[in-house]
Image (spheres, grey):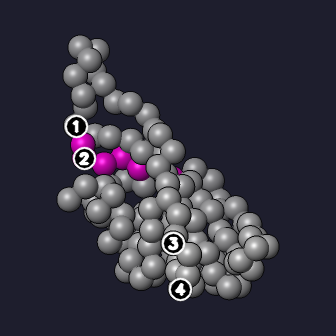
Amino acid sequence: MSMEQHLDAHLRALCPNVHPDIAPPGTPRPYITWQALGGEVARFLDNTAADKRNTLLQINAWAHTRIHATTLIRSIEDTLAASPHFVARPQGEAMSTFEPVTGLYGSIQRYSIWATR
């Protein structure tokens, strides 16, 4: 399985509503979205690819309350840190946001993830 497939399985164990990039309108709350933001390229001096790939990933937890969004993003951090499928390192603490149009509270955290190519 790919890193993205393992990531999806880990996130769905915490919340059934998981979507890459954006959630469709009407998605039940809470939900999780994630986006790849690039990452480091791992190549040897002869330009052959390493057996690992790095992805800088942003994960967003959306809920009706600040406490629920914060609790969900912290559970995500614990789950990803314990994964046997990749190495996930948070790139700082979660950020808080509020979406006035939808009335949703969000918690956003970025990770550097190293996984098998």
Would you say residue 115 sits in the magenta stretch? Answer: yes
Q: First in sequence, mark 2 or 3: give its number.
A: 3
**Disc 4 marks which residue?**
28
Q: Quadrant of residue 55?
A: top left
Give the amino acid type for the residue marked by disc 3 in the picture.
Answer: Pro
Residue 8 image point, x, y percent: 36, 67
Q: Amino acid at mark 4?
A: Pro
Label 2 belongs to which residue? 116
Which span of residues is magenta-colored?
A: 111-117
User: Which is closer to the viewer, label 4 or label 3?
Assistant: 3
| N-term mark: 3 or 1 | 3
Q: Amino acid at mark 2?
A: Thr
User: Secondary structure beneath disc 3?
Assistant: loop
On the image, which quarter does residue 83 sit in?
bottom left
Q: Position of residue 12 (x, y in %)?
A: 38, 77
Q: CA distance from mark 2 to mark 3?
A: 30 Å
Q: Is residue 79 left or right of residue 108?
A: left
Mark 2 → mark 1, Cα distance in angstroms: 6 Å
Is 70 or 30 nearer to us in this picture? Answer: 30
**Which residue is labeled 1 in the image?**
51
Lower position in the chain sequence, tag 2 or tag 4: 4
Q: Which residue is mark 3?
A: 24
Q: Main secondary structure of the magenta part?
A: strand
